[in-house]
Image (cartoon, rainbow, N blue to C red):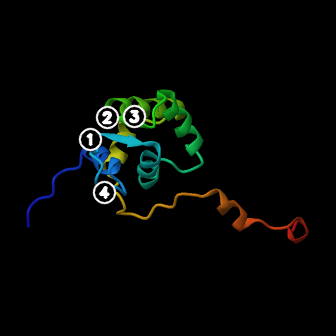
Amino acid sequence: MGEEEAATLEGQFYEFARLLDTKRDGTTITLYRSDYWMRQSKILDDRKLTMTDTGILFNKFSKSELNWDEWIEYLTDVCELKDFDLEKTKETLTNCGIPGQTPVVVPQYRDFFNTYKPKEKMIF
């Protein structure tokens, strides 16, 4: 068997930029795809880093898609905001596997209501 090629952050960017649409050229990434990538690598956990945080920082660019250089600047901003180590974050994103390799649950607003209990049924 041949040796596997080592993963690179730029290669991962290309793969996740093409997530769910293989006709894309992989040079720009959307917020949804970037968040999916961060969820797969367990960086975006809705506790320390939320989708609101990523959305605000992404919209700083006033674009719907970012190229490689803009995305690196965006990632740097995320790490500065949440006091993450930039190099460790890049390593985590590089080694999280190809898109879809591990299951990713993207929370939906309606999921909140699945856990709803009426006030009368709550135990105090």
Where is mark 1, residue-wise? 10
Q: Are marks 1 and 2 in contact (CB under 8 Å)?
A: yes
Q: Amino acid at mark 1?
A: Glu
Where is mark 2, residue-wise? 68
Residue occupying image coordinates x 34% and y 63%? 101
Is 100 left, or right, of 1 in this rendering?
Answer: right
Q: Would you call the spot at circle 2 few (<14 residues within 10 Å), some (14-19), or many (20 or more)? A: some
Q: Residue furthest bottom?
A: 121
Q: Would you call the spot at circle 4 few (<14 residues within 10 Å), some (14-19), or many (20 or more)? A: some
Where is mark 3, residue-wise? 86
Where is mark 4, residue-wise? 98
Q: Position of residue 30 (x, y in %)?
A: 42, 43
Q: Residue furthest front?
A: 23
Q: Is disc 4 placed on a helix, strand or loop?
A: loop
Q: Would you call the spot at circle 1 few (<14 residues within 10 Å), some (14-19), or many (20 or more)? A: few
Residue occupying image coordinates x 53% and y 35%? 82
Q: Position of residue 45 (x, y in %)?
A: 54, 51
Q: Position of residue 105 (x, y in %)?
A: 51, 61
The quadrant in which the N terminus is found is bottom left
